[in-house]
Amino acid sequence: MPVTVETEELRTALERITLLIKERSQADEIVGKVSFKEKRFWCKTEDTRASMEVEFLEGLPDFCIEGMDLFRYLQRVSEKEVTLDKQDEVLVVKGKRTKAHFACFEPFMFSLPKKWHNIGPAFLETLSEASRFVSKSFYRPILTAVCIKENMMQASDGLLFFRTLGKDRFMRDVESLIPGASVPFIQLLAPDQFYIDDNIMYFKQKPTLIGACSLLGGEYPDTSKIEDEQEQGQRVSFHPDTKEAVARCSVFVEHSRFDEEKKIYVTLKKGQANLSVKASIGSNKESVKAKYDTSLEGVSFCLRPDFFTEVLKKGTEFLLCPKSLQIKRDELWVASALISRS
């Protein structure tokens, strides 16, 4: 039975779904396709799933097509309405001056939760911030995830650490490990509810869009050793100009191929913090005002400029510890491991 729909309504629905399925895979023929079944669109990638109500297609037989292809076609259709019809193994899209045929595949769907829980406030903003600290290397896969438990969210690549506490619980009382690679997908969904079933986390955006991503298994590493360093830390205060000084230093090392060049040296001397970098393309020195205990006079330490930059985004009042530079407040903890200290 042919169904006539508004072109813009169909195009908008496909756009929201295809934003989530740009990935294709030879290993799984379903990836990259959009299925219509039970008045919903269904799609998936290797690690994510999405489903959306499209009641305006009611009356059409089930079908499955390459979603991006139909979306790109509709972007070039200027007519206000199109008629869709399933004929054998083809979806026919017809306007007054256009007629297209799209090859159909076997329709698919997946189960959806029947109950939901509300997501706590500031979840998306905090998840986005924490995801900047996850590891990009799969040498320790567990560190490629954001760890969430009650009102705590944390992430680390093993050398740079981030933890924040929300005013209310983000999701649930037990630990959840959301892959950093899934964060952009979750941001696109902009959910307000969730449900967890085994290792799959479902997100719901009222009233129509549901997405899901796989959770990582395992237990997040214990960070108590670096937290215990706070007891030995000494307070250091740098001038706000330090951010710009470190940014200038970073120019010389941020694109270096050699890890040994990705260092910024800091020396506390005569009420100043003297910063220096040296790389194959050149060198730079900066001085900024600093306040510190006299016992730290002449102390030097070294860390990565990009790590220093992340710490500086949270403030300029530090704890200089034996092996780390840390900022610790009631709701926030961020730390960078030091390469050396003398």
Image (spheres, helix red, strand yellow):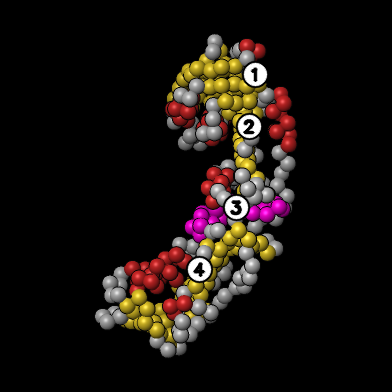
Amino acid type at circle 2 is Lys
Residue kind at label 3, given as amino acid type: Gly
Residue 215 in the image: x percent, y percent? 65, 57
The residue identified by callout 2 is 328
Left or right of 43, for residue 113: right
**Residue 342 numbered tag:** 1
Q: Residues within 10 Å of mark 3 (few under 14, many from 20)?
A: some
The amino acid type of the residue labelled 1 equals: Ser
Q: Is residue 172 magenta?
A: yes
Whether tag 2 and tag 3 are in contact, CB under 8 A, the answer is: no
Q: Quadrant of the C terminus?
A: top right
Q: Residues within 10 Å of mark 4 (few under 14, many from 20)?
A: few
Residue type highlighted by circle 4: Thr
**Mark 1, secondary structure of its residue:** loop
- Residue 1 visible to an observer of this rendering: yes
Residue visible at 43% across and 69% down in the picture: 13
The answer to whether residue 262 is visible is no
The location of residue 208, given as percent across then percent down, is 50, 68
**First of labels 3, 4 by sequence position:** 3
* C-alpha span from label 1 to label 2: 23 Å
Question: At 70% across and 33% down in the image, what residue appears?
Answer: 226
